[in-house]
Structures are given as C-alpha cells and as structure tokens.
Amino acid sequence: MMRKYTYVLMMCGALLVGLASCGGGGKSKNADSTDTSAQKNNSTSSNTSNESEQSSESSGNSNSSVSASKEAQVIQSYCDKLNSYAYMEIKSLFANNVTQYIGMKNTTNEALAKEIKRFLPTKSFIDYHAEVDQLKVNGKTARVPMNINWEGYQARVLTEIEFDDNYKIVSYKEVKRLPLARKIKTEKRQVVKTYQNCNYKSKKGDCPYMSFDYVKVTQAPSVELQEKMNKKIISLLSIGTGEELKTEADVTKAANNFVQSFAEAVKSHSANSTWYTKSDLSVRENNGIASVIYSSEGYGGGAHGFSSIATAHFDTNTGKELTLNDIMVPNYLPEMKKIATKVFRKLNEIEDGKTISDHGYSMNDNEKFVLAKNFLLEGDHIEFMYNRYEAGPYYLAPPMVRLKYKDIKHLIKKDGPLGHKVK
C-alpha cells in the first residue's frame, strides 16, 4: 500500500510532536538489542524557523537519586515500548485516569494507547529518544528534553511529566519547542508527473504517476560538503527510476519518461493495471552527522510491487561520507555479527537447535549473518534496514535489526563520529 502522509488529524496539532517525543515505530518488524514485545511531512529546513527559542529546563533539583532513577526508568520504558511497536502496552505506564496526554485531556490510559496505536503507524523511519541525562525532577514532576525523528521531520521538545505515588504517569505535557543544533540547511523539492493529468492523491488509486518528494542542501559548513550531499541526493533518487540521474533536471525528465512509458503500454494493451512510483528523501542531522534517507515504492506491472530503502551519512565537520568502518574499531564485524545474530534470533523466536536459514532466510548465524547495507544512526542505537531479497525471499518481510550503543560500545571508536555515545 502507498504510505499516506497526513498531518491534519483529530487532536493532533499537539499530538503530532508529542507522540514523536520519545518513542518510535515503523512498518516492519524490528529486532532490538533490548527486550521487546513486538517490534511524512515537514522538511528538515522548515523546523529551523521555530527553533530560535532557547532551552529553559526545570530549575527544581532532584529529590533523590533513587527518585530520579525511577522516573528515568519509566520514561525510558515509555520510549522503548514506542520504539518496539508495543503501543497498547504503554497503558501500563500510565494511571487509569490521566489529566492530560499531549492534546488529550481527562482521558484514560486505554484511550491514549489506542490513539498512539492509530497515529504512529502512519509514519516511517521513526526514532524517539529521551535525553535522560538532562532529566530534572522536582517533587513528582519531571522535565526532560525529547527528540523526534521520522521521515522528513525532526524536532526537539521539553516535556513535563507528572507521576503519582506509584510512579504511574498522570500527566504528560509539552512545555516548549527546543532548538536543534544544525549545520545543514535544506529546501523542499517536489516533482510529480501524472498520466493524462489524473489526480494522483485520489483514494481510488487509479492514477498512474511518478513523484519525488526530496530536499536540496542550500547551506553546509563547506561548499565541498554541500556539493557532495546534493550529488548523493540525486544519485539516490535514481534508484526508483532505473535511470542514472545527475541533475535536478534529470529528475523531471525521469518522471516524464515514466508517464510516457505507461502511455505506450496502454496503446499496446500491455498495461493491465495502474503503475506508480513514489520516492521520498529527507536529511536528518544529529551530533555532527548528517544522514540522507531515501525510500521508494511502486508498481510497474508483474506479480507484485517494489520498494527500496537507501541511506548515506556525512561527517559535518570533515565533509567525509561515512561507512561503518569509519565509526567502528578495526575488525569489529565478526563480533557485531554475533550480537546481531542473538538479537535476530530472539525477535523471530528461533528455537535452540534451529538456524536462521532454517526459517527461510538467505543468511545464517554468526559469521554467515549479513548486516544490511543501509543503516540509520539513531538516538541510542544503530538500525540496520534490509531491502527485499537482501536477507531472504520476497515473501519474507525485510527485517530490521536494532543494536543499542550500550551493547556494542566496545566496538565503537572512542575518537570517531559516534564517540560521544560511549564516553
């Protein structure tokens, strides 16, 4: 199905940022290196206009280290449940009656969990991360900065969370938008071509089209980095076209070619269904690393549709395009494969005595485990994202393997781009 990007939702003016404050979800099952029950759009540049306000966290001091630790545990559990798709389990962290949850007032833990379950699956590439090292506790009230990333959107907000005597959440509010430290600025771009000017947004799904929603880097610490990133952006947009694109003009040309190909297929009576290709590309920036995130999906005839995911990462200080070899210590791969194997086996409930390949995947355990070519560097983990056929046949949904930094800290270069995560 085509992903739908809807931002005008019931009670979601505040809920939009709020649900994104501290948890995440996607559309594929995700293997996580911590226990889990289960496993678009404002552009990056559009966020900057609202981020001039400076952070002013609670001035209250923590009552005790035990109290602060307990609040931190609940907040982290809230994040983990959202990140692992355990939406309905979130209600266990809230009191039965909740005075406020983002834009919902005088609600219940059951109702807010249902709203989360309705809302979050409409987003892609979501990561929520609480800055628990910045947690401030005063009495039964905690304040903590929360980060949200999803495809085409990035924000940081200060949240205020009130607890009862049993450390159940009775109120969850957003106090203010906090600034994001950014060196990269972007502008949104869109190219859409349709067959016979049909409405590609129609719910009927009968409009052949090719669309590109992407960004162009307009400012970077160096001209070299800006050029590198824009070149990579066009290169990634090529994936969904079958053509080699080099300029923005080529993007428009590719869309026209797609529609023309469909028109010719109609004339030859070989187009027995609607074709479409939808590509999305955004830039995310965190702690000196700018990530380009591309996804596409579509159908061009045949037995089934297609989809693709691709990422690229740049050090904003040096301008270097980063690979895992730049982030990890030498000879990290065998150990990382062992850790990923355990994570993968646990999520897929592979019993002892059976191998990963016994379950239909083309990869296997330990040294024969295959890490996805594409990955995201998130708030507290690396997420490896597989494309179709990369880990198994088409009928198996592409897995996602999430490795917590704390579980692989011995493999991360202390003086590398992710060194701040393990110091």
Image (cartoon, rainbow, N blue to C red):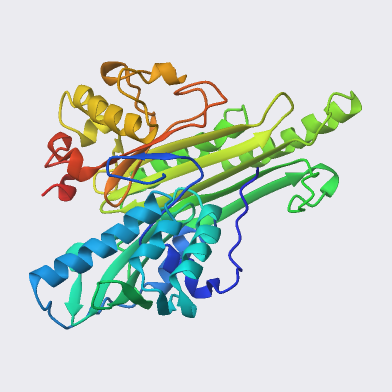
Left or right: residue 29 compared with residue 64: right
**Residue displayed at 33% across by 61% down:** 78
Q: Quadrant of the N terminus?
A: top right
- Left or right placement of residue 122 versus residue 408 in this view: right
Kindly tell me whether residue 220 is visible in this rendering.
Answer: no
Query: Residue drawn at (17%, 41%), measured in percent from left and top?
Result: 416
Viewer-proximal residue among 33 and 217:
33
Q: Could you tell me residue 53's position as x and y percent?
A: 33, 78
Q: Is residue 290 visible?
A: yes
Residue in the image at 40% along x and 17% along y: 357
Position in image of residue 326 (x %, y %): 23, 34
- Position above or below: 6 against 31: below
Task: Indicate the position of residue 4 as horizontal and vertical percent values.
Answer: 63, 53
How many numbered circles does the render carry?
0
Quarter holding residue 135: bottom left
Quadrant position of residue 299: top right
At a point 22% along the width and 68% down the height, the residue shown is 71
Q: x, y (%) of residue 127? A: 38, 53
Tell me if residue 303 comes above or below residue 403 in the rendering. above
Q: Taking 138 as reference, is 214 above or below it?
A: above
Give the camera-side residue of 374 and 107: 107
Pick whichever, 330 or 111, lies toward us: 111
